[in-house]
Amino acid sequence: MFNFKKGLTGLALFLSLTLILAACGGNNSGDSSEGSSESGSSVGEEMDYEIVGIEPGAGIMKATTSAIEEYDSLKGWELIESSSAAMAAELGKAIEDEEPVIVTGWTPHWMFAKYDLKYLEDPQGLYGEEENIETFARDGLKEDKSSAHTILDQFKWSPEDMNAVMVEIQEGAQPEEAAKNWVNEHTDMVEEWTNGADEVEDEEISLAYVAWDSEIASTNVVAQVLMSMGYDVELTQLDAASMFIAVSEGDADAMVAGWLPITHADLLDEYGDTMERLGPNLEGAKTGLVVPSYVEADSIEDLKPAE
C-alpha cells in the first residue's frame, strides 16, 4: 500500500535533486565563457593593473609605454619604474606566492633558467623580433689602444655562454669571480678574441655598462680578458643614455651593451655618428612582457583593460 507521507518526502527529495542538478548544469554551460572572462580580468585585478618595469629611459620601458597606449587590453594599466634587480625580486616573490605578475623581461637572463616563464605574444610587434647586443668604441680607440680595439672587435659569444655567467652570479658569486671562472673554462674562445692583439703593460681602459644582469656578465667577461692582456680596466655603471653619451664623448673607451635595432634605437640615432660601431657581440636576444607560465594569458590581447 502506498505510504502518502513517505511518497511526498521522496517526491520532494527527487524534485530538490533535480533542481540542484539543473542549476549545476546551467552553471557549467553558461559559466564556461563567463568564468574564462573573469579569469582573464582577474589577472589584472590581482596585480592592480600594474606592469613591473626596470630603469626609466630603457628601451623596453619605452616599448611598454607604447604598448599601454596601443593595446586596448592594456588601457588603464600602469608601468612601474624600478630597476633590473628590483624587477627580478618582484618576479621571484610573486612566483613564491603563486601570484600573477607581469614584468618587462628579456633574454638572455638568468630568470629564464631559474623559473618557468613565457613571453606574452605581441601581435602588433611593438617589441620587435630578435635583437642583437652590439659593441661600440669611442672614436680614436683603434689608434690609441689597438690591442683593446682588436679584442672588443672580435668579442662574440652566445646566449648560452652569457647565461652561464649570469646564473653563477645569481647563485652568489661576485661578477668578476664568475667572469674569471668562465674565461678560464673557455680558453679556445678567448684565444679567438685575442688573436692578433699584443700584450700591453699597465695601459688603462674604461668600459661603461648598464646594470642589467646580461650586461654585468658580458662587461665583466671582457674586462677579465683585457686584464689578462695587461690592461688596467675601469668599469663604470651608468643608465643607458649616459652610457651612450660617455662613449660618444670619449669619457668611456667602449661598451658591449647596445641593444638593437629596437631597445636603444633612439640613442643610436642621437649618438651613433660620434662613436665607432663594431657590430654584434651576441645575436638572438629578445625583449617583451614576461609572465610565469601559470598565468592564464598567452598574448597581450588576452589581458583586460583596467575598470
Image (tube, helix red, strand yellow):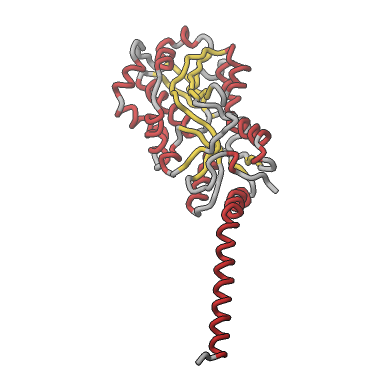
Vertical comparison of 291 with 261: above or below: below
In-front residue for pair 234/4: 4
- x, y (%) of residue 278? 48, 14
Q: Is residue 134 left or right of residue 50?
A: left
> Where on the picture, by quarter, is residue 186?
top left
- x, y (%) of residue 286? 49, 30
In-front residue for pair 264/68: 68
Residue at 47% x, 45% y is 293
Vertical comparison of 218 with 268: above or below: below
> Where on the picture, by quarter, is residue 111?
top left
> What is the number of callouts on the image?
0
Query: Can residue 46 be spotted in the picture?
Result: no
In-front residue for pair 8/262: 8
In-front residue for pair 52/141: 52
- x, y (%) of residue 300? 58, 39
Residue at 39% x, 33% y is 165
Query: Can residue 152 be spotted in the picture?
Result: yes
Residue at 50% x, 21% y is 255
- x, y (%) of residue 174? 41, 37
> Where on the picture, by quarter, is residue 166?
top left
Q: Residue furthest front?
A: 1
Q: Is residue 6 left or right of residue 150?
A: right
Residue at 47% x, 7% y is 143
Vertical comparison of 248 with 16: above or below: above
Vertical comparison of 248 with 82: above or below: above
